[in-house]
Image: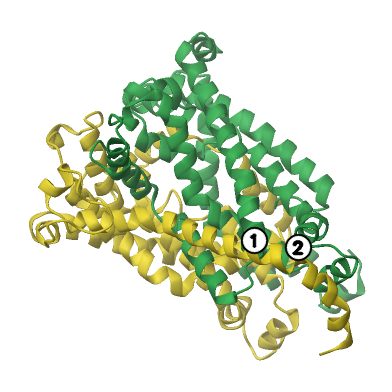
Chain colours: A green, B yellow
C-alpha cells in the first residue's frame, strides 16, 4: 500500500484512486455479470426445488421443504434407471466408435498431398457440423422412411422394408451413425492443427532411417499428436453423463423406442414440463448435473496433470 | 536438387509402389466420404423438386422425379413460411449483435490485470460451464420473469456463451498494452481505448465469434419450443420441428395431425439450410480459426 508509484498521485486512498482510474472497466462488466447472476446463477439455485415442493404459481424456489422425497421417488422408478442407463450407453457407444474413426480420418486426411483436394474434402466434411439438429433429424427420418432410399435398397435386394424409426433395436445405430456423419469432419480440426505443427525434419530423419510412410505415421505423427489425443479423450470421457445428446434424441425418439432411446434429458422434459412434476424432474436433472460436474472436474484435473494445461 | 534430397532418394524408391497404391485408395476413400456427406442434402433437394406421387412410389434416388416447382410455390405463397423465415433473420441479427456486444464487454475487462477480482469473476463464469440450472429451473425462471412469448425468450437464454468469452479474453490479452496506453495519452478514456483501439484490432476474432453466434441463433429451435407458443413469433427451425414431428404421429399438435408430405418437409429443410450451405464454404476459415484459438491455447 505504500508503493512509491501510488504515492505520486496526491491524497488518494488506493481504493478510491484505483476506482477513479479504472471505473469504466467495472461498468463494462456490470450488465454481463448481472446477466450471469440472473440467467445462470438463479436457475442454478433454482435446483433447490428438488428439495422443496413447487407448484405452478409458487415462488421459483418452491413452497415448503420436502427433504429427499423426490430423490427417493425417482430412485424407486424403473423409468429413471432406464433413462440413466441409456444416457451412459448412448454417449459411450458414440464415443467408442466416433473417437477412433475421427482420428483415422485425420491421419488419412494428413496423407493427402494435393492441397486443393485436401481443402475441398475438409470443407465438405465440416459442413454437417453447422446444420441445425432439426434438419439432421429431418434428414434421418426422410432417408429411413419406408419409401426412402435405404428401404428402397433393401427392397431391391429382396428384403422387407424396415420401419427404422419405430424400432428400439435400431435407435443406437441411427444415433451413432448420424452423429458420425455430423461430427467426424469437424472433429479432425484439432488433430490437423497439431499435425501441421510437426517439424518436417522429423519425417526426413525417419525416412533416412528407412521408415516408410506407415512407420513414419506410427513413430512420428502419432507421438506428436498424442497430447491432443489424450486431452480430447479425457474431455469426452468427462462428458459421458452430459446432455449433449438431448436435442437429437428428443427429435428422433418416440414412445415405441423409449426402451433404448429415452435419456435423462428427455425423461426430465416429460416428467417436468409435460406432466407438471416440476420438483421430481428437477431432482432427476440435478442428479445428472452433479454426476456431470464430478466427471468434468476429474477430467479437467487429469488433463491438467497430463498436458500441463487445463481445458479452459 | 540439394544433397539431402539425393540422400533421401533410396527410401523413396523403396516405398513408392505401396505408398502409391495407398494414395490412390486414400483419394477414393475421401471421395466416398464426400459423397456420403453430400448425399443427404442432395436427396432433400431432389425430393423438394419432386411430386408427392413419385416420392411415395420411392422413385427418388439422386435426381428429382416428375420435376416441378409446385412445392416451392406452395411454401412461399400459401404457408407462413416466409413469416417464420423473417423471424429467424431478425432473431439471428438481434441475437448476434447483442451476444457479441455483451461478450466483448465482459471479456475485455477480464483481460486486464488491473481489474480487481478479475480472476474471481473468471471462476464465477467458468463454473457455469460445469454446472447449471437444468431445464426445469430455467423454464420456471423465464416464465416467472414474464418472458414467455417475447423475443427475449429466444435471445436471452443463449446470449453470452462462456466459451466464447474465454476465447475473446485470451485474444484481448495479446493486444500490446502500449497501443491502448498511447490512445489514452491522446485523450481516450478506458472506454475509448476499448472502442477505438482494442475492438478494431480484434476484427478477426469478432468476425469468428459473430459467425458462431449467427449459426447458434439460426439453428436454435428448443428455446422457441419451450417459450414461444405464439405462432407469429416462431423461428423457422421450430416450424421445421413441427413439420417433421407431425409425420411421426406421436408429437403432433392437435391442429397439425394431418400427414405432411415429404416434398414439403424437404423443401422447408432446403430453404432453411440454404443460407448456411451457400455462405459457409467462403467463410469456413473463420470458423476453423476460432476453433484453433480454443484448442491451441485454452
Q: Is residue B8 above or below residue A232?
A: below
Same chain, marks 1 and 2? no
Toward the viewer: A75 or A251? A251
Q: Residue under mark 2: which chain is it in?
A: A
Toward the viewer: B34 or A269? B34
- Return the mark for residue A253: none
Query: Which image quarter holds the N terminus of chain B?
Result: bottom right
The residue lying at 26 percent from left, 37 percent from top is B245
Q: Is residue A226 above or below residue B31?
A: above
- The picture places residue B12, in percent across and down from the top left corner, at 79, 72
Locate residue B135 relative to residue A26 in the image: left or right.
Answer: left
The residue lying at 71 percent from left, 70 percent from top is B173
Query: Which image quarter holds the C terminus of chain B?
Result: bottom right
Toward the viewer: B277 or B58? B58
* Quarter of image, res B253: top left
- Return the mark for residue B22: 1
- The picture places residue B190, in percent across and down from the top left corner, at 63, 76
Q: Is residue B76 above or below residue A231?
A: below
- Return the mark for residue A213: 2
Can residue A267 be seen from the camera position used here?
no
The residue lying at 17 percent from left, 47 percent from top is B55
Q: Point out the frontmost of discs 1 and 2.
A: 1
Locate residue A81 relative to residue B143 in the image: left or right.
Answer: right
Q: CA distance from mark 1 to mark 2?
A: 10 Å
Amino acid at each position: 500500500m505504500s508503493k512509491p508509484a501510488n504515492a505520486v498521485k496526491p491524497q488518494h486512498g488506493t481504493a478510491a484512486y484505483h476506482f477513479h482510474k479504472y471505473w469504466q472497466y467495472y461498468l463494462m462488466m456490470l450488465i454481463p455479470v448481472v446477466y450471469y447472476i440472473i440467467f445462470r446463477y438463479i436457475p442454478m439455485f433454482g435446483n433447490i426445488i428438488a428439495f422443496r415442493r413447487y407448484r405452478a404459481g409458487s415462488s421459483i424456489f418452491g413452497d415448503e421443504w420436502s427433504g429427499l422425497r423426490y430423490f427417493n421417488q425417482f430412485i424407486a422408478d424403473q423409468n429413471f434407471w432406464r433413462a440413466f442407463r441409456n444416457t451412459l450407453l448412448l454417449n459411450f457407444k458414440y464415443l467408442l466408435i466416433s473417437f477412433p474413426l475421427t482420428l483415422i480420418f485425420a491421419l488419412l486426411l494428413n496423407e493427402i498431398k494435393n492441397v486443393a483436394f485436401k481443402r475441398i474434402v475438409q470443407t465438405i466434411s465440416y459442413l454437417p457440423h453447422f446444420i441445425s439438429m432439426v434438419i439432421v433429424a429431418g434428414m434421418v427420418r426422410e432417408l429411413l422412411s419406408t419409401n426412402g432410399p435405404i428401404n428402397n435398397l433393401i427392397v431391391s435386394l429382396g428384403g422387407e422394408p424396415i420401419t427404422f424409426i419405430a424400432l428400439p433395436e435400431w435407435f443406437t445405430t441411427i444415433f451413432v451413425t448420424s452423429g458420425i456423419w455430423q461430427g467426424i469432419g469437424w472433429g479432425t480440426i484439432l488433430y490437423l492443427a497439431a499435425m501441421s505443427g510437426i517439424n518436417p525434419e522429423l519425417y526426413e530423419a525417419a525416412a533416412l532411417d528407412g521408415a516408410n510412410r506407415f512407420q513414419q505415421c506410427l513413430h512420428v505423427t502419432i507421438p506428436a499428436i498424442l497430447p491432443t489425443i489424450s486431452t480430447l479423450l479425457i474431455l469426452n470421457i468427462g462428458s459421458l453423463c452430459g446432455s449433449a445428446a438431448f436435442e437429437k434424441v428428443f427429435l428422433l425418439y418416440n414412445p415405441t423406442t423409449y426402451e433404448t432411446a429415452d435419456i435423462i434429458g428427455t425423461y426430465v422434459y416429460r416428467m417436468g414440463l409435460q406432466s407438471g412434476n416440476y420438483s421430481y424432474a428437477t431432482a432427476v436433472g440435478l442428479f445428472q448435473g452433479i454426476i456431470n460436474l464430478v466427471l468434468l472436474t476429474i477430467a479437467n484435473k487429469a488433463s491438467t496433470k497430463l498436458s500441463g494445461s487445463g481445458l479452459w | 536438387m540439394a544433397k539431402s534430397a539425393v540422400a533421401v532418394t533410396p527410401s523413396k524408391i523403396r516405398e513408392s509402389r505401396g505408398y502409391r497404391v495407398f494414395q490412390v485408395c486414400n483419394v477414393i476413400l475421401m471421395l466416398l466420404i464426400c459423397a456420403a456427406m453430400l448425399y443427404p442434402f442432395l436427396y432433400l433437394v431432389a425430393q423438394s423438386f419432386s411430386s408427392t406421387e413419385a416420392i411415395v412410389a420411392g422413385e427418388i434416388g439422386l435426381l428429382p422425379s416428375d420435376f416441378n416447382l409446385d412445392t416451392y410455390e406452395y411454401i412461399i405463397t400459401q404457408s407462413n413460411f416466409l413469416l417464420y423465415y423473417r423471424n429467424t433473420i431478425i432473431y439471428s441479427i438481434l441475437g448476434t449483435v447483442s451476444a457479441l456486444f455483451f461478450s466483448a464487454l465482459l471479456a475485455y475487462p477480464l483481460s486486464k490485470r488491473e481489474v480487481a477480482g478479475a480472476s474471481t469473476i473468471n471462476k464465477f463464469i467458468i463454473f457455469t460451464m460445469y454446472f447449471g440450472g437444468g431445464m426445469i429451473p430455467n423454464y420456471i425462471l423465464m416464465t416467472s420473469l414474464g418472458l414467455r412469448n417475447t423475443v427475449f425468450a429466444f435471445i436471452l437464454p443463449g446470449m453470452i456463451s462462456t466459451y466464447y468469452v474465454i476465447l475473446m479474453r485470451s485474444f484481448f490479452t495479446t493486444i500490446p498494452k502500449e497501443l491502448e496506453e498511447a490512445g489514452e495519452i491522446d485523450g481516450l478514456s478506458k472506454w475509448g481505448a476499448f472502442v477505438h483501439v482494442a475492438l478494431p484490432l480484434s476484427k478477426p476474432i469478432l468476425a469468428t465469434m459473430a459467425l458462431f453466434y449467427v449459426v447458434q441463433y439460426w439453428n436454435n429451435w428448443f428455446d422457441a419450443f419451450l417459450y414461444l407458443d405464439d405462432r407469429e413469433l416462431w423461428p423457422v427451425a421450430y416450424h421445421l420441428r413441427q413439420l417433421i414431428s407431425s409425420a411421426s404421429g406421436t408429437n403432433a399438435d392437435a391442429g397439425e395431425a394431418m400427414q405432411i408430405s415429404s416434398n414439403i418437409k424437404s423443401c422447408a429443410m432446403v430453404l432453411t439450410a440454404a443460407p448456411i450451405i451457400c455462405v459457409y464454404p467462403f467463410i469456413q476459415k473463420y470458423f476453423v480459426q476460432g476453433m484453433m484459438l480454443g484448442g491451441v491455447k485454452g
